[in-house]
């Protein structure tokens, strides 16, 4: 930890009355060239003569403070939080994450450990890449496949994490990975992606634009891959033109970790580290996540290849972030700098982790009211590879909580003392061969479960199989991605044996992405999608299974029927991808989800016409017509049936999660802005066409897939 000497206190940047920008310029003015280059690596060394402590920029907070040496609250994985469709919950979760992150950082400062990863206040999250293909293992980190849902949830996260203090940041968020980045994992360091201008501006850029221009996000991380023959971190279009010039981004840009060495090692677009560092710097990449390429800036600057003012511009951005975080101000002046260690796993944080786990659960099927189960059943059989798997609940990029409740533990805690809970893992996630020996073993498991009153199979996949750059060699998985979206065939085989017992089988699916399960959808009476639910995921599942919580999660991705529905994984064209462009029939559609109660919509009010460039308001009533209190996710979709150019089949434009008591009704209103009624042309320009616009409001997409929790109302307006 740097010691603040009397002489260091005299530097102008120590004057808290000066603007942060002036103070940042003053810091940079006092640095030697060697010191400047050192500050452009993610592990920035201390500058003792200035009293500047070492600082490690690398930290993660995808769904709670991640990878810290201290126990923290672990919320549901990002894809699960997206399934809540609840911006208020997500914003509060991000606030709690920042509070715990402050507590971690304050302990690190006290211990002089500011040079270590995962202890700082600059979080490289959220991941707002569009989850265009369910095979991508890191799709679990995103908020799904839709630009509107992703932007709205991402904005809530950024605002919650960074706070609303007029002077200081609570923590610094970073939108990643910029841009056009969503697998495959094994080739991410060398992929060269090409898209049309239409897809770039219609699908891949809108979320980043929202977080930069509206959200005030502190940082942006550029991606590993190349885009149109230039690495993303040295890309004329993405970094210089769009990010800095068109959007006016003044925050800091960081490379993905070791992405700059990809320039010459894998992309082969640059000769060596020196040329790579020079190109990344002049394209606005301010800091390298890494410790090798940007060291070449020292000789590049000395030789005149790089102008020192380029370094100064980057460093001013970097120190501005540290100043806004209060790192050079007295702790008494910074409202977050005294956050105590007692904030870690605070009761309200743990309660919110449970709330979000409950909110995230999507009821996919409930034939003949199989659910909820009675708590006084004589015997319940709990089977499957995820039934007692705490690792699956935590997802990737997770922190370590003191306690994780598995599904098995949640069920045991829920039922009465007279109910036997019989557990058998039964199988691994997948086996290479479904042979007679395996079938015999499954038959034995089913025989022993056959005297239960109900069977709960907890399967799916796991972050042990899908995630970032994994070394997995299991049938159906490769390098962190999936080679098939189907549920492993051995799980289906065991489920078929369990079904043959004649007892009701409830399938609890843990997953970070869409799973094709045609046999299960056709033959099992109840399917519950619980994602990777965080530390309280098992409790939340039990609450839903036994009716103590009425599920209201909605899918943030399309569940396709088979691999045949998917285009080539490496093709980034959006044709026939996601609900916005998919022309087939999904198993379960984006926005879909059931409830233990029912909702009815009525009294749709939309104007018959609206002037070009003007907003419009749509209202409807929604009533809980069932006998159980519940929540509904009201969704508004727009389409342009008369437009002859490229356009989505339909597109989500607004949503709101509302709670309604049994018998209660409420009027919901949404104001759509002109951009909500706009399209993108082939050159990537946003425009608003005249003519008919179809609009729907309800519990899901109009006419898409199985019946949702509520009906859908539709109408048309004319833009004149």
Image (cartoon, helix red, strand yellow):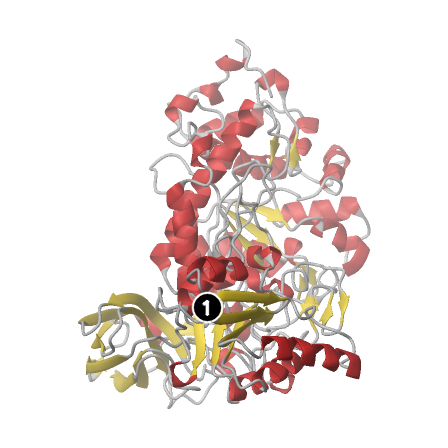
Q: Is residue 210 visible?
A: no
- In terms of image quadrants, where is residue 717? bottom left
Query: Viewer-proximal residue, 121 or 32?
Result: 121
- Residue drawn where x is 62% and y is 75% of the image: 448
Q: Which residue, given by chain and number where applicable, does mark 1 sit on?
A: 147
Query: Viewer-proximal residue, 590 or 200?
Result: 590
Judged left or right of residue 70, residue 661 is left
Q: Is residue 679 visible?
A: yes
Alpha-carbon neighbours of circle 1 within 10 Å: few (<14), some, or many (≥20)? many
Furthest residue toward front: 418
When the figure is inspected, residue 463 is found, relative to residue 648, above or below; the finding is: above
When the figure is inspected, residue 285 is found, relative to residue 671, above or below; the finding is: above
When the figure is inspected, residue 344 is found, relative to residue 512, above or below; the finding is: above
Q: In the picture, which quadrant includes the C terminus?
A: bottom left
- Residue drawn where x is 73% and y is 82% of the image: 439
- Could you tell me which secondary element the residue under label 1 belongs to? helix
Q: Give how far across and how far down residue 647 sits, in percent.
A: 45, 82
Q: Give how far across and how far down residue 445 sits, in percent.
A: 66, 75
Furthest residue toward top: 6
- Residue drawn where x is 71% and y is 48% of the image: 258
- Residue drawn where x is 37% and y is 30% of the image: 335
Q: In the picture, which quadrant includes the N terminus?
A: top right
Q: Give how far across and how far down residue 493 sits, in percent.
A: 66, 82
Judged left or right of residue 424, residue 371 is left
């Amino acid at each position: 930890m740097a010691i603040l000497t009397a002489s260091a206190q005299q530097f102008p940047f120590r004057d808290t009355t000066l603007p942060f920008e002036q103070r940042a310029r003053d810091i940079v003015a006092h640095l030697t060239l060697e010191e400047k280059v050192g500050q452009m690596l993610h592990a920035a060394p201390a500058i003792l003569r200035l009293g500047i402590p070492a600082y490690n920029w690398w930290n993660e907070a995808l769904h709670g403070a991640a990878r810290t040496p201290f126990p923290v609250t672990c919320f549901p994985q990002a894809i699960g939080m997206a399934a809540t469709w609840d911006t208020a919950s997500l914003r509060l979760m991000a606030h709690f994450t920042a509070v715990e992150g402050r507590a971690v950082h304050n302990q690190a400062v006290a211990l002089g450990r500011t040079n270590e990863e995962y202890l700082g206040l600059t979080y490289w999250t959220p991941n707002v890449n569009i989850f265009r293909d369910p095979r991508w293992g890191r799709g679990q980190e995103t908020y799904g496949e839709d630009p509107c849902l992703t932007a709205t949830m991402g904005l809530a996260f950024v605002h919650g994490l960074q706070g609303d203090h007029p002077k200081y940041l609570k923590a610094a968020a970073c939108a990643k990975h910029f841009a056009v980045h969503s697998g495959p994992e094994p080739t991410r360091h060398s992929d060269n992606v090409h898209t049309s201008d239409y897809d770039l501006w219609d699908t891949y850029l809108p979320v980043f634009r929202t977080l930069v221009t509206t959200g005030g996000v502190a940082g942006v991380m550029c991606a590993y891959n190349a885009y149109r023959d230039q690495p993303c971190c040295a890309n004329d279009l993405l970094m210089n033109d769009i990010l800095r010039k068109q959007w006016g981004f003044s925050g800091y840009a960081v490379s993905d970790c070791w992405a700059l060495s990809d320039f010459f090692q894998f992309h082969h677009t640059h000769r060596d580290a020196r040329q790579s560092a020079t190109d990344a710097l002049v394209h606005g990449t301010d800091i390298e996540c890494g410790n090798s390429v940007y060291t070449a800036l020292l000789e590049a600057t000395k030789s005149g290849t790089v102008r020192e003012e380029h370094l100064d511009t980057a460093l001013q951005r970097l120190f501005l972030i540290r100043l806004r975080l209060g790192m050079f101000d007295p702790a008494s002046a910074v409202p977050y700098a005294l956050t105590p260690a007692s904030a870690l796993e605070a009761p309200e944080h743990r309660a919110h982790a449970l709330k979000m786990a409950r909110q995230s659960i999507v009821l996919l099927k409930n034939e003949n009211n199989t659910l909820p189960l009675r708590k006084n059943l004589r015997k319940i059989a709990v089977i499957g590879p995820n039934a007692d798997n705490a690792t699956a609940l935590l997802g990737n990029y997770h922190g370590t909580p003191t306690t994780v409740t598995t599904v098995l533990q949640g069920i045991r805690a829920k039922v009465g003392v007279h109910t036997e809970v019989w557990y058998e893992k039964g199988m691994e996630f997948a086996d290479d061969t479904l042979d007679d020996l395996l079938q015999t073993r499954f038959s034995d498991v089913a025989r022993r479960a056959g005297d239960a009153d109900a069977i709960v199979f907890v399967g799916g996949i796991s972050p042990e199989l899908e995630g970032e750059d994994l070394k997995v060699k299991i049938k159906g998985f490769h390098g962190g991605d999936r080679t098939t979206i189907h549920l492993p065939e051995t799980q289906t085989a065991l489920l078929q044996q369990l079904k043959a017992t004649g007892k009701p089988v409830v399938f609890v699916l843990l997953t970070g992405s869409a799973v094709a399960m045609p046999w299960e959808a056709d033959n099992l009476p109840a399917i519950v999608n619980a994602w990777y639910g965080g530390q309280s995921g098992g409790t939340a599942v039990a609450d839903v299974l036994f009716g103590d919580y009425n599920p209201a999660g909605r899918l943030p991705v399309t569940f396709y029927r088979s691999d045949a529905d998917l285009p080539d994984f490496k093709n980034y064209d959006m044709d026939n991808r996601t609900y916005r462009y998919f022309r087939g029939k999904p198993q379960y559609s984006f926005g879909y989800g059931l409830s233990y109660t029912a909702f009815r919509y009525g009294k749709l009010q939309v104007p018959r016409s609206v002037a070009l460039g003007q907003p419009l308001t749509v209202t409807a009533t929604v009533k809980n017509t069932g006998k159980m209190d519940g929540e509904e996710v009201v969704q508004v979709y727009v389409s342009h049936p008369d437009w002859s150019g490229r356009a989505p089949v339909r597109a989500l434009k607004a949503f709101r999660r509302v709670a309604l008591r049994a018998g209660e009704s409420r009027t919901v209103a949404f104001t759509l802005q002109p951009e909500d009624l706009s399209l993108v042309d082939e050159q990537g320009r946003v425009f608003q066409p005249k003519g008919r616009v179809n609009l729907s409001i309800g519990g899901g997409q109009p006419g898409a897939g199985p019946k949702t929790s509520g009906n859908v109302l539709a109408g048309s307006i004319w833009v004149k």
